[in-house]
Amino acid sequence: MNRCRLMLAAVLLVLAALPLQAQQSGTSLSGSVVDESGAALPGVTVLINGPGGAKQQFTAGDGRFTFTGITPGTYTLTASLPGFAALTQADVAVGETATDLPALIMKIAVRGEEVVVTASKIESTIVNAPATMSVVTADTIAASPAQNYGDLLRAVPGVNVIQMSARDINLTSRQATATLTSSQLTVLDGRSIYLDFFGLVLWDFVPAITSEIKQIEVVRGPASAVWGANALTGVVNIITKSPRESPGGNFVLSGGLFDRDAGSTVDEGSGNNYGINGSWSGAPNERWSYRIAAGFFHSDPFARPVGFVPGSPLTTGGIPLTETCTQVGHPMDADTLTGCALYPADRDPAAFGEQVFKNTSTDQPKVDLRVDQELGNGGRISYSGGYAGTAGIIHTGIGPFDIQNDSYMGYGRVAYTKEALKVAGFVNLVNAKAPSLLLPDPTGQPVQLNFKTNTYDFEIGHSTVLGGKHILSYGGNARHNDFDITLTPNGEDRNEFGAYFQDEIFFDRFRFAIGGRVDKFGNIEDPVFSPRISAMFKPTPAHSFRVSFNKAFRSPSVINNFLDQSIIGRVLDLRGLAPFLPPPLAAFVAQPFPLIVENHGNADLKEESLTAYEIAYTGTFNGKTTVGLAAYQNDFDDNINFVSLVDNPTLPGFELYTPADPPPGMPPVLVGILAALPPPIGPILLPKSGGTYLNLGPTRQRGVEASIDHAFNNRWTAFANYSWQDEPEILDADADQIPYPVSEVGIPPRNRFNAGVNFNDRRFLGSLSVNYADKAFWVDVLDRTFAGYTESYTMLNASFGVKWNEGKIVTAIKGTNITNESIQQHNFGDILRRSVVGEVQVRF
C-alpha cells in the first residue's frame, strides 16, 4: 500500500505543479455558433489564439460564447464539434471595447473526416488513422433501439458480440468471442474499466447515461503499440461530453417488457425491465463547470435453455425433440465428440451438487460526478469520481456465478490537458462476491469467487509536429494492482510499466506510421515489445489505401498464474463393483462417491501474442458516402487457455490419485483396485487434476470486412456492413510448444451482416436495422459435452421518437428482435426474444 500512496502522491504533485494563471484584465469577445439551418449549437469548442495567449470556451445552450479579460489585438478563432466540419476564422480583430462577432455557421462534417483519438491517442480522422476504426456517433446512439452496449456495438463490422444473461455481455474484434473475454480493452474518458485480475470487462460498471456520450470509437485490430497489454484484439473508447457541452438537466425514464415464452419460462409470462437516470450540468463561471449524474437499471431474468445442448442433430434451439441424443464430432475433427449434455435445470436446487441453478435478475445503481477547471493558460484539469454497482449472473468456463447485490466498482480520476499534453491518474476499486451456481467445494458448499482489486494508474502523453512532416506522439504509464481473491490465495500484487513512441511521416500522397511500445510486467521475466508499421497512399485527401503490421500481447492474469481451487469434479458410482469386492469395500461403494479434483494456475505462463497483417481502404465520395474495405490475417501464439486435463490426460500437469495419495475418504486399497482396471477406464478413473492454464501453439484467423455509410441529408443516414471470418487454422507448433487441441477451438460466425437507416430532425427521430449472424461453434463452458453450435439468427430492430417543446422532451419506443425469434448468442447463454421499451427524456 505504501507504493500505492507514493504513486497517488506523485500524481497529485504533478497536477499541483501545473500553472494556474489568474484572469487578466482587458476587453471581451463574444458571439454565437449555429448550423446551416440557423439553429443554435451548444457544446461547441471555441478556441482563440493571439496576443493574450490561448483561451478556450464551450457554447452554452443558446449557442453563445463569451471570452473576458483578453488583450486587444488580432486573434485566430477555431470552432469544433463532433459531426461538424471544423471552422477557422483568422484575423479576428478585438478592440479596446467589447466585440460581438456575427454568427458563426458550422457545416455537417464530410463523411470519413470525423475526428478520432483512439488509433494513436492523438487527434486524427478516420481516413488518416493508422488503424481500422469505426465511430458510433451521438446521433446514432440517440436514435438507436439498443438497450445495452452489446446491442449498440453489434452493428460495428468485425465486432463479435454475445449476450449471455440480463447483465452479461462479451465482445471481441476479429476472433471467436467467449465467456469472460479478456482481449478487448475498454476505456471510458481515458480510464480503463478492464479488470486486470482476470482480464474481463463488466459493462454494467460503465457509469454513463447514453445521452451524455459524445461518441464511441472502436479500433478493430491489435492496438498494444500505444495502449499496452490489454488491447490484444482492439479498443472500445467511450467518450462522454464535458459539462459545458451538455448544459442543463437531463432526465430519462424507461420501462418495458420482453417475451420469455421459451425454454425454462414457457408458462411464466413476460419479464420486465426499467431504468431511471438523471444528470445536471452547470457552469457557474468561466473557470468552473460540473456534472452530477445518477441512475438505476433493473431487468428480470431471461429464459434459460432446457433439454440437450445444441450441437446434436436431434436438438433444435435447446428444445429436445427426443429422449435420446447422439454426440457429433467437432467441425474440425470428427473424432472429437461433443454435445449431448443436459442443460442444468432452471430451478431452486434441492441439494447443492445437482445440475440445477436459478436464473437471476440484475440491479445496477450508478452515481457519477465530474468537475472541470479551465485554466488561464488554455489548459484544463478534470476531476471525476463515481460508483457503479451490479448484481446478476456472469458465465465462465466453469459455469455460472451469481454476483451479489453489494458488488461495486468505485473510481476517482484527475486529468490535466493542454493542447496535446495529457497527464492523468486514476484509481479503480472493485469489490464483488459471486458464489458458483453449479460447482461445490470439497465441503459441498458453493465455490466462492470473491474479489477485491485496487488499481492505481498514472499516465502521461504528448505529441509534437516536427519539420511540418512528422507528428511525434509519445508517452507512458505506471500501474499497480492490489489483489485479494478467494480463488488465488497465493496471488501476488502486480506492478506494470510501459512507454510508447510513434512517428507519423508525411510525403505528399504518402503517410507512414512507425512506432512501438515496451511494457514490463511483474509476472513476466522480460520486457515485451509491441511494434506498429503502416504505409498509406492517399491519391486524394478523401481516399486512403493502407497496409499495416501490428504485434500485440496479453499478459497472464493473476487468475491465470495463481488459481488454486478444489471442487467436487465428479461423482463416482461404483455400485456395480460391489459383488466383486470384500464386504468392507463393498459397503464403501454402496453409495456414490464424490471425487475432489484440483484446478490450478500456472506461474510459468508466457505472454500471449498476436501478429496481424492488414490491407485496408477508406474513401469518401461527394462528402456524403464513406466506403471501407479491410482484409486481415491474425496469427495468435502462446495462447493462454484453461484446458481440461481430464479430457487431455497427456498434457503437462495431469495427475492421478494413487494408493500412496488417495482421494480424501477413499481406502488406499480400493484406489489400487481401480487403478488396475484395464484401459481406458482404469488410468483415468481417478483424476486428481481438473484443469490448468497452458500456453498453446499457434492459430490463425483470416477475415474480410466491407462497410458503407451514407448521409442523404442532415436528417437521413444509412449504413450496411458485412464481415466474413474464416474457420480458425491450427498452425504447426514449435518443438517446445503444446499443439493447440482441436477440442479447445471455437469457431466464430462465418458471415455477419448489419444494415440500417436512421432519421433525426427537429420533430422526429427513429431507426430501423437488421443484424444477421451465422451459426457458431462454442467450446468454452465446462467440458466438451457442453460444446456445440448455436443456430444462425436475424434480429430486426426499430425505434421511433417524437420531440416536443423544441426538442426538450422526447418520447420514444424501442424494440429489439421484433419478429420474436428464439435466439441464443452462445450455446450456454440465455434465450433472447422480443423486447420493447418505452422511454421519456426531458432536458431542462
Image (cartoon, rainbow, N blue to C red):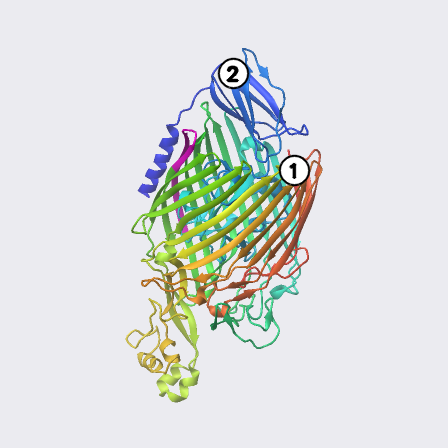
Q: Quadrant of the N terminus?
A: top left
Give 163 or 121, whichever is nearer the viewer: 121
**Residue linked to disc 1:** 842
Point out the stretch of residues depicted in magenta: 452-474
Seen from the viewer's position, the closer of residues 119 and 142 is: 119
Q: Is residue 466 magenta?
A: yes
At 57% from the left and 50% from the top, the residue drawn is 706
**Quarter placement of the C terminus:** top right
Q: Residue at x 39, y 31 (%)?
A: 15
Q: Amino acid at mark 1?
A: Val
Q: Residues within 10 Å of mark 1 (few under 14, many from 20)?
A: some
Q: Main secondary structure of the magenta part?
A: strand
**Magenta-drawn stretch contains 367:** no
**Corner quadrant of residue 842:** top right
Q: Residue furthest top?
A: 96
Q: Residue at x 57, y 51 (%)?
A: 154
Displayed quadrant of residue 84: top right
